[in-house]
Image (spheres, rainbow, N blue to C red):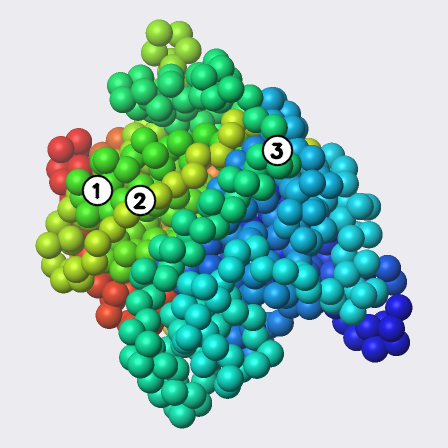
Amino acid sequence: MPEKVQEKKLHIALVGNPNSGKSSLFNCLTGLNQQVGNFPGVTVDKKTGAAVFAGVPAEIIDLPGSYSLYPKRLDEWVSYKVLVGEDKDIRADVVVTVADASNLKRNLLFCTQIIDLKIPVVVVLTMMDLARQKGIKIDLAALERELGVPVVAVNPRKNKGIAELKKAISLTVQQAYKTPVRDFIDNKSLAEAPVDEVKQHFPQISDYKAIHYLINHESFDLTPAIQETIENIEVKNNFNPTKTQAEEILQRYSRIRHVMQQAVSEPDPLQKSLFTEKLDNVLLHRRWGYLILLAVLFLLFQSVFWLAQHPMDWIELGFAKISEYLSSSLPDNRWTDLLINGVVAGLSGILVFVPQIMILFGLITLLEDSGYMARISFLSDRLMRSVGLNGKSVMPMISGFACAVPAIMSARNIENRKERLLTILITPLMSCSARLPVYTILIALVIPQTYLLGFLSVQGLVMMGLYLLGLVMALIVSYIAKWFIHIKEKSFFILELPTYRSPRWKNVFPTMISKARIFVMDAGKIIMIISLVLWALSSFGPGNTMQNLSQQYEQLKIEPGADLAQLEKEYHTVKLEKSYAGIIGKSLEPVITPLGYDWKIGIALVTSFAAREVFVGTMATLYSVGDDDNSLLLKEKMKAAVRHDGTPVFTLATGLSLMIFYVFAMQCMSTLAVVKRETKSWKWPVIQLIYMTGLAYVMSWVVFELFK
C-alpha cells in the first residue's frame, strides 16, 4: 500500500436510491460508531460512522437517497454536490453505490451516472434474496465486466458479503483510489463542442462532469469570471440542458438494457405475481384499503392500553409504596418533604409512562419494517391533495404521532414549498407521545374502564378518538390555510413502495429502549427540574405568609374541641393557595374558569408549555405537597380533589375539556424552535402558537358547555 494512503483517513460516501438497503448497510459497516448531525449550511440529516478497511481508519458518510444526478429536493442537492466534488466540507475518496438487485434496471441509472463522473466506485447489490424470489439471476462477474467497476452482493441483515465488500474497498484503496476505466455511454456526443470548451478550463474533469457544469454551474461555487465563461459557452453553442438530459437518459437506458441482457436472467413477466403484489391488491384496495388502515390504527392504540396497563400499575404502586415507606421512616422536616413530594413524585411522573412509550414506538417500528408505512402514504394521497397537501405529507404527520420535532424536520423531503409549509403548520396537531401521559391520566380519571361487546375498551376508543380528532382538525386547518398561502408551484407525488418484509425483531427492542431512554433523559430532565421548582413554589410564599399561617393554625389546634384532622387538611389546602404556585394559579383562574379548570390546572397549563408531559409531573407535585397520605396513587388523589363548594374538580366535562385542550394547544417550546429553524422566520411559529392556542381554548369551552 502506498505510504500516503496509509497515513491519511479514508472518506467513503454511501449513496443509492431510497429503499435500496443503504441504511442497513451503513448500520452494518459502522455498528455503534455513529453520529447524527446536519450537513453544513442546511437542515438535512447527516449520518457518519467509523470503520477500518485494511488497517486504514475510515469515515463513512450516509448520503441522502437519490434517484439520479438531477436533483429536485434539498436532500438530493446535498448528495449531488458531494458526488460532483462541489462540497467544500465533505469529500469522498471512494463512493459505495447501493443498488436493489430486485429492481436493478431502475437502480443502474444512478449507478452509471456516478461511474461516468470518473470517481472511485464500488457497486453493492442488496435485496439478492428478494431477487431470487422473483426468479432473477445475476451474473456478478458479467455485470462487473460491463460496468467496469467492482460489484459485490451483500445481505446486511444477515451480515453476508460484508467481508467481500471490505476487500473490494481495500483493493480500491491499495490502488490509490482507482477510477472507472471507461465511460458507460459516450457523454461527449451529447454536446461535443461545449464539453470540449468547458474542459479547456477544467482539464481534469470527465466529459460527463463537464455536462453538469453546463447544466448546474449557477449552483456551484465558481468565480464570477468562470460563471460568465460557462454561460457564454452555453449561448455560443445553443446548449439545451433539457434536451441534453433527455438524450442522456435515453442512451443510458438503451445501454442498461444491453447490460441486463448480458448479466441478468429474468423470468417471463407474464408469470403469476409475487405475494407482495397479491397483498397490495388487498391492502391498497380503493375501499378495503382504508378500512384495513383504520383497523391497523385502532389495534395500535388498543394495544398501547392493553399491553401497558399492568406495567404502569406496578410502577405507580411501587412509587406509592416508596413514598409511604420514606414518610414513615424519615423525620418530618423540609428535606423529607423535598425528597418525597419533589424528587419521588417527579420520578413517578416520568417512569410511569415508559411502558406506553416503549410499546407505541415498538409497534410503529414493526409497521415501518414491514413496508406498510409507505402504503399509508399511497392510500392517503388523494385525501391529502384535497386539502392542499400530497401523499408525502403523511409521513411527517405519522411521525408527528411520536414527536413533532423530527416530524417537522422530515418535511424537507416535500419538494413543493407550499405543501411543505402547510405540513409544518399542521404537524403539531398530531397527538405526539408527550401527550400520551396527559391523555392516559385524564382518561383513567373520567372514562369508565368498561368494554363494548366484551372486548372493545371504551378507554382505548376514547384514546383513538383523540388521535383521530387531531388528524381531522389538521386536515381542516390545511384546507383553510391553503387559500392564504400564495405560493404557486406544480406538485408531483412519486413514491416507491418497498417490498413487504418480515420485521427485524432484533431491532424492535433496541428501538424501544432507545426511545424510552430519550424520553427519560430529555423529557425527564425537564420534568424533574419543573417538579423541584414547583415543590419550592408550592412550599413557600411571599413575606411571612407561611409563618403566619402556621402560627394561626397552631392556635386553632389548641382550642377546646378542635377537629385536628380537619384542621390539618384545611391548613395544607390554604397553605398551597397562599404559596407562590397558588398565586400564579389564582391569577389565571378567571381566564380558565369558563373551561372548567381550577387554579391547580392553571399552574399545570403554564408549566407544561416547556413540554406537554410535564402536566402529569406538575399534578403529581401539586397533589403531593402537603398530603399526609403518600400511599394514595396520583389518580386517586386527583379523583378525590374537590372545589371550595365541595364539587369534584375532575368531572366528565372538565376531563373532556382538558383532553381537547391538549389535543389542539401548542404546548411545546421545542416545536416552535424547530419551526423557526425550518422556515427561517419567526412569522410562522407565532402564527402557529396563536391559531393553536385559540383553537384549543374555543374547542375546550364548547366541549365543557356541552357536557357540564
Q: Nearer the viewer, residue 225 or 534?
A: 225
Q: Quadrant of residue 129?
A: top right
Type of the residue with mark 2 = Phe
> Which of marks 1 and 2 precedes in the sequence?
1
Q: Evaluate if marks 2 and 1 touch, with contact meaning CB atoms under 8 Å apart.
A: yes
Disc nearest the viewer among 2 and 1: 2
Q: Which mark is residue 684?
A: none
Read off the residue under disc 3: 264
The front one of 568 and 195 is 195
Earlier in the chain: of badge 3 and badge 1, it is: 3
Report, in whole angstroms, how far the alpha carbon at label 2 lies from the one at label 1. Answer: 10 Å
> Tag 3: residue type?
Val
> Left of 651 or right of it: where is 167?
right
Q: Nearer the viewer, residue 603 or 511?
A: 511
Residue 513 horizontal/vertical position (percent): 64, 42
- Answer whether residue 378 is visible to the viewer in this image: yes
Q: Is residue 61 above or below residue 649?
A: below
Considering every residue shown, the one lying at the far top of the view is 453
Which residue is under mark 2?
493
